[in-house]
Structure formats: C-alpha cells, structure tokens
C-alpha cells in the first residue's frame, strides 16, 4: 500500500510465534502505522505482546508488559495483554441465577470466579483475519465458546478486532452473539508502563472521569454500594500520580493492597473519554475512551518482583497498571448494577479506543 507521501510499507504482517504442546501453531500479527507505532498480538489468548510508541524525543519504546516466548505466556497467570471473557473481573462464589436457573462456574480465585475461569478466553486459540485500509491496519480475532464452557450457558460467538490507525489510535471492538440467555463482560488486560521497563508506575499522572467507584470486600467482591470518590484516595478527577495516595490508610486500599477497583464513569453517552495518563519523564501519554460504564484501575499490586519479562527485564511490584474498560464486577448477582445479560437475537457490542501521544 502506498500514499501520496510516498509511504510504502506493510501495515499488517503475520508470522509464526510458537507451538502449543498439542502441536497447534500460534501466529503473531504485527500492525504498523505511518508514525512507526507498532502493535504485535498473538492468536493465543488474543494477547498484545508488544506496543511500541514514541516518547517526546521521538524514540520508540515498548509500553506493555509481557514475554518473549509462547512458553512463558503458557506458564503465567498474570493475564498480560490478554482478551478476558466470558466474564471479566469477579463473580461471587462462582454462582449466578438467570431466568430462574442457577449456574455454577469455576472458583479460580479463592471461592470466587475470575476472568472467565480456569480456561477463559486468555487460554484459547483465536482465529485471525487481517485487513488493511488506507489509514489503518487490523486483525479480527474470533472464537466460538461452546455452551457449557466453564459453566456458562449458551453458545457464544465472539469477535474482537484490533485496529491501529495513522492517528496513533488503537481501537478495540468487541462483538458477541448467543443462542441462549447468558452473561457477557469482555475486556482487554494489557499492563501499561509508559516510562522505562522494570520501573514502577507510581509517578504516572492519571485522570479518571469518574465521580464514583465500587467498594469491595476482603475478597474483592463488590459490596453493592456505589460510593463517591470526593475526599478519598480514589479521586482522580484531576491529574494525580498513581502513587500519590496509594499508601493512604483507607480501608479500600488496604483490602486490595492498592488500587484494584472499578470506577463508575461519568457522562455515558456513546464513546466517551474515561481516562488520561501522562508519564512525566519521557512524556508519553495515553487517552482511553469507551462505550462501557466502568473502568477497572489495577495498580499491579500482585506483581512480585520475580517475574522476568521481555528482554530479561524483571517486573517489580506496581511495575504496570491496567485500565480495563468493562461492566461492573459481579453484575449477575447485583441487581443495582447495569445488566450483563445477553439474549438470542441481541448483539453484545462494545468499543474502547486507546490514543497515544507525547507531551
């Protein structure tokens, strides 16, 4: 593909990444725009393994945590870069009732269900269809989740599309349909560090457009409340370093070991800004817009300083942050929360846009 500026390069490339133990091949798809911003994703878990963006000096750097090999991803439980489903976040006691029928899910996080269970969408092989447009390149990842998989009712047909355009925006589109009533809550679980790999993210300046958050109990299950952020360590309505109040003696920070909470976003009307992050040392920025009602801020509390990632870099505690756009955790058991029920004939559709820059 060429442009009137003489730009000529493949926007999309596909290559072999590794083999599963059963012999199935896993591919890597690379998306590249005119600015040199580059994303690589693999068909195992739809994982974004690399995302290269420029800092204020123009130098490219990888801003997501991950590994160099497929074997390392197979042995890890951190969900680095993966598509999460059928249900992102937690469902209390691995149980919910839908239309009077009780369903039992895997309890893979203490007594609770987390991120789709023992074999969620982060641990399946996705089919990949690549495409190129005049101003963008992308890959559509698709998967069919059989009825009863991980205990969920209904066959779920899922497509997640990554599109990287010349405006330095990564758009993630989610689409799902079902043949029986079920619950769905899809998200993307990249850990970001806009600064130097191997350092913490506590100095990143974060804005979240949310006047309320969802308190959780000691098992990180919502209490059912929706609490105002004003006057608390959860008030990111003005730019604030992630680490500025992370050690404050507030009960919600204590039970989670930092930030691991859903923020209730303001002004939900279509695709609306949810958050903005700036790393002051190198100047990289990231804006997040979404159609979802919430975003989960996770401050890397469970990173233990022992995980060795790409290029041998060790990831310290709080060495990455997540902004997981989603519906609220445990919604199937929380009647006050927006519904996550999907029925035959309906389409689950969601969009999140990550826009990168430097200042």
Image (cartoon, rainbow, N blue to C red):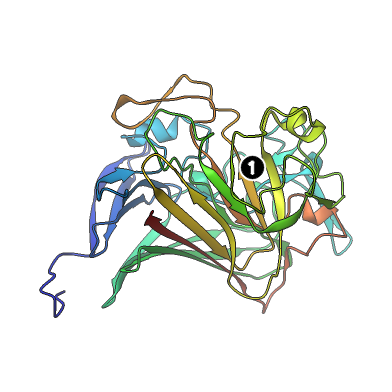
The spot of residue 250 in percent (x, y) is 79, 32
Left or right of 291? Residue 284 is left
Q: Does residue 190 lie above or below 66 as drawn?
A: below
- Res 196 visible: yes
Left or right of 254? Residue 276 is left
The spot of residue 235 in percent (x, y) is 71, 47
**Residue wearing tag 1:** 117
- Res 116 visible: no
Left or right of 25? Residue 279 is right
Query: Could you tell me which residue is drawn at 48 percent across and 20 percent down?
Result: 305
**What crowding class fits label 1: few (fewer than 14 Cα within 10 Å), some (14-19), or many (20 or more)?**
many
State the residue lying farthest toward the left. Answer: 6
Q: Does residue 354 lie above or below 202 as drawn?
A: below
SS under mark 1: loop
The spot of residue 348 in percent (x, y) is 62, 70
- Relative to the observer, which residue lies in front, 57 or 141? 57
Give the image quarter of residue 18.
top left
Q: Does residue 110 lie above or below 22 as drawn?
A: above
- Relative to the observer, which residue lies in front, 47 or 183? 47
Query: Could you tell me which residue is drawn at 30 percent across and 43 percent down?
Result: 61
Give the image quarter of residue 23.
top left
Q: Quadrant of the N terminus?
A: bottom left
Query: Could you tell me which residue is drawn at 26 percent across and 78 percent down?
Result: 134
Give the image quarter of residue 137.
bottom left
The spot of residue 136 in percent (x, y) is 31, 71
- Relative to the observer, which residue lies in front, 13 or 266? 266
State the residue lying farthest toward the top. Answer: 306
């Amino acid at each position: 593909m060429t442009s009137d500026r003489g730009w000529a390069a493949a926007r999309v490339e596909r290559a072999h990444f590794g083999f599963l133990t059963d012999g199935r091949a896993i591919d890597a798809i690379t998306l590249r725009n005119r600015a040199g911003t580059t994303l690589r994703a693999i068909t195992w878990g739809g994982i974004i393994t690399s995302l290269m963006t420029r800092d204020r000096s123009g130098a490219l750097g990888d801003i997501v945590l991950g590994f160099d090999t497929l074997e390392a991803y197979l042995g890890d439980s951190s969900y680095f870069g993966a598509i999460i489903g059928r249900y992102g976040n937690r469902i209390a006691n691995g149980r919910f009732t839908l239309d009077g029928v009780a369903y039992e899910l895997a309890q893979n996080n203490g007594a609770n269900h987390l991120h789709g269970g023992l074999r969620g969408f982060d641990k399946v092989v996705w089919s990949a269809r690549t495409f190129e447009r005049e101003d963008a390149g992308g890959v559509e990842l698709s998967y069919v989740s059989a009825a009863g998989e991980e205990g969920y009712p209904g066959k779920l047909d899922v497509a997640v599309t990554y599109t990287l355009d010349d405006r330095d925006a990564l758009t993630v589109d989610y689409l799902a349909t079902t043949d029986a009533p079920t619950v769905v809550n899809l998200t993307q679980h990249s850990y970001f560090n806009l600064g130097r790999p191997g350092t913490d993210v506590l100095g990143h300046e974060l804005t979240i457009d949310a006047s309320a958050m969802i308190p959780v109990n000691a098992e990180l299950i919502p209490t059912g409340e929706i609490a105002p952020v004003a006057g608390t360590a959860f008030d990111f309505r003005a730019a604030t370093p992630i680490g500025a109040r992370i050690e404050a003696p507030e009960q919600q920070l204590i039970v989670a070991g930092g930030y691991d909470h859903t923020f209730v976003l303001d002004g939900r009307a279509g695709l609306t800004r949810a958050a903005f992050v700036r790393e002051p040392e190198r100047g990289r920025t990231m804006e997040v817009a979404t159609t979802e009602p919430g975003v989960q801020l996770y401050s890397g509390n469970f990173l233990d300083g022992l995980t060795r990632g790409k290029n041998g870099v060790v990831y310290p505690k709080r060495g990455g942050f997540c902004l997981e756009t989603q519906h609220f955790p445990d919604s199937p058991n929380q009647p006050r929360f927006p519904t996550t029920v999907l029925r035959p004939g309906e389409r689950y559709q969601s969009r999140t846009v990550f826009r990168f820059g430097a200042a």
